[in-house]
Amino acid sequence: MAKLISIFFAALLILVAAACSDSSTNSNSGALTMGTMKCKVDGSSWQSMNAMATKAGTNAINISGANYNIQTQVTETVSFTIVGSIVEGPSNNVSIAQYSVGSTSNPMGATLYNSTSASINITTVNDSEISGTFSFTGSTNAGASKNITEGQFRVKFVN
């Protein structure tokens, strides 16, 4: 679990750095830079500033997206890890899915909503990118929950 959390925070750091990069050289040609992720969180629309996929060894992929609200200084992330064979179609091999929300004023106080039974459908996978749909219900240790529905992702592998 500690390794998974480390992968998650490494992915978050890359996402924040990418979101802060100079976008003046980016074109609107429709090319995928790193990726996109969107879903509904308890019925409210959410969209990442950027998203990506990382390969963890030979049999696992972590897919994550993050959004930072500069006015409220709140970061929200959605991530999940698929283990085993990564093929197109429904995947029953999700080791963890997570929605987290935290503030830059208290980065270690993020609230984590975890699930081990996410629904993931991979529509495309190749050497450079992966796309699909997802949904899950995450819960905190205190019993609070968040419903993540109508999720979509299209992300490039960064490694």
Image: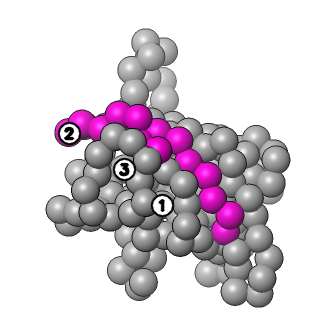
At x 23% / y 63%, what residue is drawn? 59
**Residue 105 location, quadrant:** bottom right
The reply to whether residue 155 is visible in this rendering is: no
Q: Earlier in the sequence, mark 2 or mark 1?
A: 1
Measured as percent of width and height from the top left, residue 140 is found at 70, 79
Q: Which residue is mark 2?
A: 127
At x 20% / y 39%, what residue is drawn? 127
Circle 3 residues within 10 Å: few <14, some 14–19, many ≥20: many
The amino acid at mark 2 is Asp
At x 45% / y 76%, what residue is drawn? 5
Pick the residue in front: 136 or 1: 136
Marks 2 and 1 close (CB-CB < 8 Å): no
Q: Which residue is mark 3?
A: 53
The reply to whether residue 83 is visible in this rendering is: yes
Q: Is residue 97 magenta?
A: no
**Residue 145 location, quadrant:** bottom right
For residue 96, side relative to residue 130 (left or right): right
The amino acid at mark 3 is Ala
User: What's the distance in space between the residues labelled 2 and 1, CA to CA?
Assistant: 19 Å
User: What's the distance in space between the residues labelled 2 and 3, CA to CA?
Assistant: 11 Å
Q: Earlier in the sequence, mark 2 or mark 3?
A: 3
Q: Is residue 124 magenta?
A: yes
Pick the residue in front: 157 or 49: 157
User: What's the distance in space between the residues labelled 3 and 1, CA to CA?
Assistant: 10 Å
Measured as percent of width and height from the top left, residue 65 is found at 53, 50
What mark, if any, has residue 80 been given in the picture?
1
The amino acid at mark 1 is Phe
**Magenta segment:** 121-138
Q: Earlier in the sequence, mark 3 or mark 1?
A: 3
* Residue 121 drawn above or below residue 2: above
